[in-house]
Image (cartoon, grey):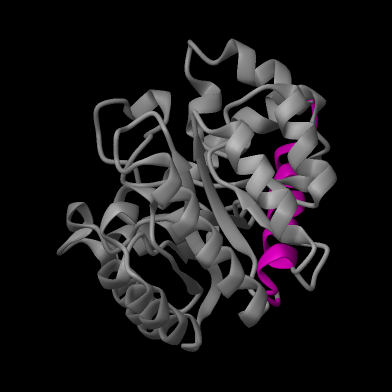
Amino acid sequence: MIAPPELFDTHAHLDMPQFAGDLAGIMARARQAGVERFVTIGIDLASSRKAIELARTNPGVSATAGIHPESAGKTSQQDIDKLAELAKEPGVVAIGEIGLDFYHDYAPAEKQIEVFRRQLELASRLRLPAVIHSRKAEKEVTLVLKEWLGSFPSDRPGIIHCFNESLETAETYLKMGFYISLGSYIGYPSAKAIREVVKCLPAERLVLETDCPFLPPQSHRGERNEPAYIAETARELAMIKGIGLEEVAKLTSDNARAVFGIGA
């Protein structure tokens, strides 16, 4: 039997209740599908702690620590200080998921921007890349990131999570040094516009994610997403770019290791 190409899920939420009691099966199915590395994402202090514990107890899993914009309205400086301590734990490879979300009425824009900036400052202090959430806030996100980059000590500042915007916006992020992360939505019937954008993006700057348990691929719509399904996204990306699946797997996995500073 031919082994599947090695894949890297850069953005999963393995601590979420949808996976309770089934994590061993999820990991086994993922590895059977060729997924050898995972980053499980913190969205608040509690989930960041859980992500760190998952990284500690599961080979191939790394963690991030961060506060999602949905929690910005109740985030204090004390919370940022606690996050700073969590981010120093072994297995933490990035600050995230952080950013701005003006699609949902999570918190006033000014508060979201304040919390976003504080976490970016933390990323600079700890020399960790950032995992960026941006929804209906591209202008504000790019302005904040441009201000921040002068203090970040690396030419690989992070990943733009679940990118689904214009080619112009993608080029802005690429010029800043960011990697672009793509999920299974690139295979949805409604995704013609983003597929056209992806055709124009350099494969050397792309990574793959599931965002599981959210955003399942078209073949599993209405179900829980899980890391094994990233193989479908890799195949979709190979078709969009007109290259082989093995090349997609190698490029995106190498890119993920590079931005997170993770060895082979």
132 to the left or right of 85: right
Q: Is residue 261 magenta?
A: yes
Q: Main secondary structure of the magenta part?
A: helix
* Residue 56 shows in the view: yes
Residue 90 spot, x, y in % from top left:
50, 88
Q: Residue sitting at 32 percent across and 48 percent down?
A: 70
Picture residue at 70% right of the left edge, 77% below the top: 263
Residue at the image position 70 percent from the left and 32 percent from the top: 238
Give the magenta part as a residue range: 242-263
Of residues 193 and 216, the one drawn nearer to the viewer in this rendering: 193
x and y percentages locating residue 99 in the rendered image: 50, 49
Q: Looking at this view, is 40 or 225 the one in front?
A: 40
Q: Is residue 157 magenta?
A: no
Q: Residue at x 56, y 25 (%)?
A: 186
Q: Is residue 172 above or below residue 11?
A: above
- Residue 207 image offset from top left, x and y in percent: 66, 48
Residue 41: name its quadrant: bottom left
- Left or right of 139? Residue 204 is right
Q: Across the whole image, how many numbered discs are drawn on residues?
A: 0
Task: State the residue in front, 194 or 132.
Answer: 132
- Can you give x and y, in whole percent of width and height, for residue 222 in the image? 24, 27
The correct choice, above or below, for 6 with respect to 257 in the image is above
- 159 vs 82: above or below: above
133 or 125: which is nearer to us? 125
Q: Evaluate whether residue 32 shows in this view.
A: no
